[in-house]
Image: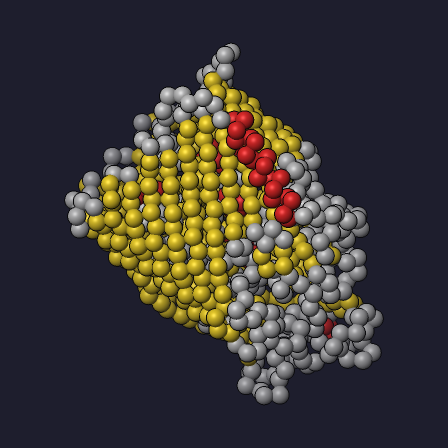
Amino acid sequence: MIEMKSPFLRRQWHWSLLLMSSLFLNPTFAQVSQLEEIIVTAQKREQSIQDVPVAITAFGSDFIEDHGVLDVQDLYLYTPGYTAPPNYDFIGLSSIRGIRSNDFGYGGDPAFGIFVDGVYQGRTGASMSSIFDVQRVEVIKGPQATLFGRSATSGAISITNNRPVEGFDASLELGLGERDRQRVLATLNGELSPEFFIRGSFLSHEIDGYLNNEAGGEDLKFRDIEAFRLAARYAGEQLDATLTYNHEERRGSGNDRHQGATARFESDLMGDESFIENEHDTVVLDVTFSPTEILEFQSITAYRDSTWDYAEDFDALAIALTASPFLQGQTSELFSQEFRISGQRESLRWFVGASWFSDDVTGYIDEQVDQGFAFTGVREGFSGQPFYELGLYDGTSEGWSVYGEVSFDVTSKLELILGGRYSYDEKELEIFLQNPATDPRNTTASFPCACYLWGLYTSVPVVSQGDWDDFSLRASASYRFNDDVLGFFTYSQGFKPGGIDSFGFDTDDPSFRRFFGFDGVPAGARPKVYDPEDIDNFEVGIKSMWFDNRLRLNLSAYLFYYDGLQVAVNTSGAAFGIENVGKVRGDGLEIDLTYLLGEHWEFAAAGGVSNTEVTKLRADVTRIAEGDRLVYNPKLNGVISSTYRQALSFGGQGSVRLEYVYQDDMMGTNSLELDDYGVFNLRAGYVSRSGKWGLSAYLKNVTDEVYFTNGTGARPFTAVVDLVSGLGEPRTFGIDFTWRL
């Protein structure tokens, strides 16, 4: 049992420690330096982040390296408005500005898209890949249907990898630490001719778990990653083509579940093992043809093959009580093609494009329920024994879109942007739910139902189809008050297509009990098709530089209206079902500040305040209520840091950075309140005089804060007790060595 400290005392101690560190690190002012310019490509061309009328949090390669970022989930502590569970390779629990997708089935889409080198990465566990040998990562907030498409309803995360470049270059990063942490990142870049370059990179990362499994078996919250990337590039005067192959194998823990706010974990899984495994291969051909200085043609062709398997102990008990073990897996093939033409002339910039994708997925969901407890609805005589239910899935999702945008300088100070995207999506999902009586794992001659997930079985596979289309608009006006201050207003629309429920069914038979029946699916029953989501977003902001580019201050305020929110709900009986439950209103304020005091000390702060409210709700929905905040939507989150750099007398440069990250309390699933938390991280480093090698040491979670990032409240057929999960990493020490040619 772990005793949770007083939030008030914890906050006072944290702020006091940060203040003392800032005073300690504050040097005598030295010669004036300037902040480096941040380049982003959110608007399909390279621009300074200060010129883009969009709320963006951008991370360069140095940040990724210094903070040990492995994937996009690790960025939530440093991105206002973004929440995610740590060490968890599934984006369904992640949200941007409170909007997320909690559909863990096969017929839906995430609330935000992950794009690597312009390529959509797919859904559920298939979308997660490691971040290594990168140029930058951009978290682009607000609806991005025009710029990115593919369900970028609440935002998009764009990862740009390093491409092969001229010259010869090599680097090696080695890391060691507690819990047998071992990290190797090697990169090699070569020039074969003045126009032909190659690049290769390899990542190996291993670290043991920090959550003790009291029932035996492997400890949870471990990571085991191996990945490599090979790229070849031809860069001629007019033609630039890059072919990239990426392979990755990831293994980690399934979602950890704890009874109440304790650190106790027990598992009844096979071999007492909870895991998530992901393997994928990706091939991308990016070709750019520039016949003139003002016209460019680009083609991005991509193929991604992935497998994903998952095991979780849902009820956190040493017996199989509710949906435990829960097993899920899938194989998928994603093919995409995008063409884009862009141009500029004097005060006019524009692009038009077309894209097409096809995503084929085959999956399964397999779980065990122990009927030793008298659940309502279970026939007499069937309690006291476990039973199993199995669902098999085969689905296809295809779509295409055409899009374009025009940017025009009305005057030297005023810029107007107008763009839009028309998209068409169609889906088909086939489901076969095995009769539990024919499952050889069930020892009883007959079983009443598959009670937990579906409440029914199918004698033959059943199929549903759906198609949706939409036109989404983006309009923006930005005004440059002077060379250093830009103000903007943006209106953007977002669209997430409808989907096909993996758990709920529709039927014309009025006697069919949709979510909890004792018989097979009646004739004519089919998987439920649900409607799209739509969002209208209004945003105003200021991007500014002050004091000779030593202070960068960016502010953004937003207001959105969401219609047709897709939520996994309990409308009756035991099962989950995806429903369009109603309307949501949200607003917030985000700030990003970096202040360089002379050449030694840098102060940075980023934070966001977010409010969401369900304004209209269907009467039969029971997991949320009108007036509720959206789940996993903290009112406040942010980070504040202090960095000191100093040239040393014996050569080279030393640095010390102390940071404090904070996340406010928030509501988890089934009205479970998750406490706020704050974490201190400390890092000290040395870079040699030549800049070719460096050594650093870090201490994460200095005060050993205990915190959880998600959870499920007690509810029949869902959880018999409050379950918290996503236990944060404890105090952890490590060292990193870097060498560059």
Image side of residue 322 versus residue 411, left or right: right
Which residue shows up at 80% across the image and 70% down it? 373
Which residue shows up at 49% across the image and 26% down it? 26
Image side of residue 175 versus residue 121, left or right: right
Question: From what the image shows, is residue 443 above or below residue 648?
Answer: below
Percent across and percent down for residue 289 are 26, 43
Which residue shows up at 37% across the image and 44% down it? 554
Question: From what the image shows, is residue 455 above or below residue 133?
Answer: below
Question: From what the image shows, is residue 647 above or below residue 411?
Answer: above
Percent across and percent down for residue 234 are 33, 35
Q: How is the image coloured?
A: secondary structure
Which residue shows up at 65% across the image and 32% down it? 733
Residue 298 in view of the camera: no
Residue at far bottom of view? 510
Percent across and percent down for residue 539 are 36, 56
Residue 96 in view of the camera: yes
Looking at the image, how many numbered discs can be counted on the residues? 0
Image side of residue 233 versus residue 271, left or right: left
Question: From what the image shows, is residue 616 above or below residue 189?
Answer: below
- State the residue in front, 338 or 630: 630
- State the residue in front, 700 or 70: 700
Quarter of the figure with residue 559: bottom left
Percent across and percent down for residue 296 are 25, 45
Residue at far top of view? 650
